[in-house]
Amino acid sequence: MTPGLQLLWPTPLGLHHCPQAAELNPLLVRIFGALRATQLHARGQAPGAFFASNDDLLQRVQLPEWQAFVQFVVGSLRDTVSAANQGAWPQQRLALQVAIEGLWFQTSRDGAFHDVHSHGNCSWSGVYVVQVDDTAQRVQHPVYGAANGVTRLYGPHMATLGGAHVDLGNAYLMPPHVDVPPLPGQLLLFPSWLQHQALPYAGTQERVIISFNASVHDAGGVDQLHPYSAV
């Protein structure tokens, strides 16, 4: 390690926009509505303010538009992960294999939310916004305001920051969380260990999102860095 300031363990994020969102999202809303009705009927449940589907959408939806969306997700993941790991991976180009470990949709309305959590058994997670009120209408909510339906990301120091002293010396820790406003067609990628939550949402349209977990491997079967130590 060289003398001077060292910035260790950054938190990489990826933001992407699906170019086919205008045509794709209304189709997904219809498909997810049918899947939700089927799943609720099978469970003997009535519709509620919050719903999460099974995480098998990758296999259940068989449409060309869906396959193109999955390719968009995989390509965005590959680009984000490659950029995040510059300097950590060996210099030679790696052939990557992106594995989607689970993919599901969620709907929320009437103040429903998803509390603080992280995801296990994967290295990256993502949220794709299918439907939500437009920004001007969403932020006018009399209680939630600009936080209505946002995805809130908590810094890795948040768990130990509560009640801690804050002055100019550790101002770099501020803010302890960042809100990502929901925009239809937006894909947010983040490390799976990052604590996050979906804040309460209420609007004229349901908030519909796709969530997923992914792992990234070397296509040759080498996932450890030590075989490259001689590079």
Image (cartoon, rainbow, N blue to C red):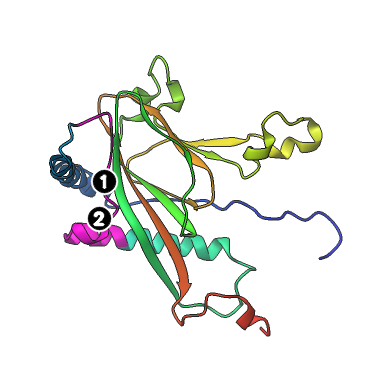
Most distant residue in the right direction: 3
State the image coordinates of residue 105 (x, y, percent, origin top left): 29, 46
Q: Is residue 73 magenta?
A: no
Task: Give neighbour class at mark 1: few <14, some 14-19, many 20+ (Cα, 10 Å).
Answer: some
Task: Establish if 41 lies above or below 103.
Answer: above
State the image coordinates of residue 58 (x, y, percent, origin top left): 26, 59
Relative to the observer, which residue lies in front, 167 or 92? 167
The residue that disc 2 covers is 57
The residue that disc 1 covers is 53
Most distant residue in the front direction: 44
Q: In this rendering, would 27 be left or right of 176? A: left
Task: Establish if 117 lies above or below 86.
Answer: above
Element at label 1: loop
Residue ID at (55%, 37%): 178
Q: Disc 2 marks which amino acid?
A: Leu
Most distant residue in the top direction: 142
Please say if the residues under marks 1 and 2 sit with CB atoms less than 8 Å apart.
yes
Residue ID at (40%, 27%): 200
**What quarter of the picture does the N terminus occupy?**
bottom right
Q: How many marks?
A: 2
Task: Establish if 171 lies above or below 105.
Answer: above
